[in-house]
Image (cartoon, rainbow, N blue to C red):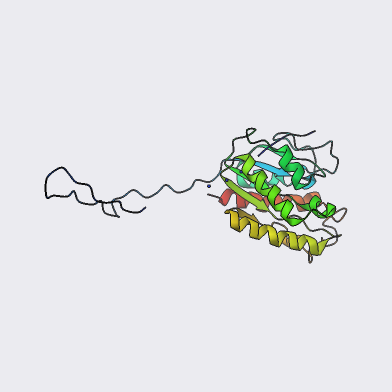
Amino acid sequence: MAAVLLAAVAGCGPTADDGRAGTVAPATSAASRSPAPAPTAPRTFVAVGDSITAGATDPSQPLVEDRVQGDASWLPAAEQASGVDLVGGWAVPGATTADMLAGVEPTDWTADAVVVMAGTNDLVRGVPWQESAAAIQGVVAATGAPTALVVAIAPNDLRPAARNGFNAALAELAGRNGWTYLDPWTEVDAGGAFPPGASPDGVHPAPAVAADAGDRIGRSLAALG
């Protein structure tokens, strides 16, 4: 069924003898040393996720490489807002974090960053957080991307408290691993659930809501580096 994917990142030494007895070459001053190059913003990214990334609820409409088949994915808006090119990804409706880890291959893409939105289906299936965390870490590592943007899962009308708890743990996991964490759903978060009109089923964002989230994700992606 679908495609595949994708992960993460002086002092002065002793003065040198210039070869003449009793003389020492002057140490290089801090001002004359070249500064370390600043990190560059990403130019390419890969994405890993489930139906909310694929933009469809039908498993026959996964993300195929860099092509979105569904009409409710956040990816097109993120790419447009960031100016960063989507070069691949793995997103299948219904996928758990374990499915994502099984689907991602470390040699499939070379990208500057990976964007991961994972965990909604783990909540549905009662997957323990420790298993979700291990799978997400594996996904980021497997992509080989030096920079990771880990995105909060969307509101969930059936499990708002569990959703909030998952995102709190996800933010802590991101901090421990040096990833960037982003919650793009704050405008449509009613205590962990969707407000009226923001979701057709209480789980998936409406297309306009997905596009707004994608815009926020894209702007965060562009700011990495």
Residue positioned most to the left = 21
Residue 139 spot, x, y in % from top left: 67, 44
Of the pair 191 and 94, the residue shown nearer to us: 94
Up-down: is 60 above or below 187? above
Residue 134 visible in the current orientation: yes
Residue 2, located in which quarter of the rendered image?
top right
Residue 99 spot, x, y in % from top left: 77, 42
Residue positioned most to the bottom = 191
Q: How many marks?
A: 0
Q: Name the residue rendered at 66%, 45% in the picture.
A: 138
Up-down: is 189 above or below 85? below
Residue 212 visible in the current orientation: no
Of the pair 23 and 94, the residue shown nearer to us: 23
Q: Name the residue rendered at 31%, 50% in the picture.
A: 33
Quadrant of the frame with the N terminus: top right
Residue 64 spot, x, y in % from top left: 74, 34
Relative to 122, 20 lies left or right: left
Residue 88 spot, x, y in % from top left: 67, 36
Q: Name the residue rendered at 72%, 59% in the picture.
A: 167
Up-down: is 13 above or below 187? above
Relative to 13, 39 lies left or right: right
